[in-house]
Amino acid sequence: MNHDSDTLDTLDDAVAAQAFRRLIRHLRHRDDAQNIDLMGLAGFCRNCLSDWVEEAGGLDKDAAREAVYGMPYSQWKAQHQGDATPEQLERMKASVAKNAVV
């Protein structure tokens, strides 16, 4: 994709921030949507979002994860994350391979 002509870059930062917050709140509400399934379908998950927040320079890793999860990551994992099946891991591997930029 040519980012030079991407209309996303012309989106007002306040609008983009509001949409980002809505996405995060949606993912907090949908704690039944496992990260492994998000990775298998879309090649990104809550951890990716928190990594992107960290990379943007706002927070360290733990604080970024807490901002995305709405609680400490270890607490979220204990309450909501199950063990991944071999099938989920295989779907994730295939999906993440599509993330490679050529």
Image: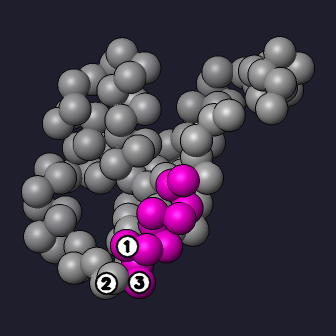
Label 1 amino acid? Answer: Leu
Residue 15 relative to residue 26: left or right? right
Magenta-highlighted residues:
87-97
Placement of 36 over or under 66, stated as above or below: below
Q: Position of residue 102 (x, y in %)?
A: 68, 34
Q: Position of residue 42 (x, y in %)?
A: 58, 60
Residue 33 at least partly seen: no
How far is the residue under mark 3 from the one under mark 1?
5 Å
Mark 2 is surrounded, within 10 Å at the Cα level, by few (under 14), some (14 to 19) or many (20 or more) other residues, namely few
Is 27 within the magenta? Answer: no
Residue at 17% across, 65% down: 77
Image quadrant holding the N terminus, namely top right
Q: Position of residue 14 (x, y in %)?
A: 63, 24
Mark 1 is surrounded, within 10 Å at the Cα level, by few (under 14), some (14 to 19) or many (20 or more) other residues, namely some
Q: Which residue is mark 1?
A: 89
Magenta stretch, main secondary structure class: helix
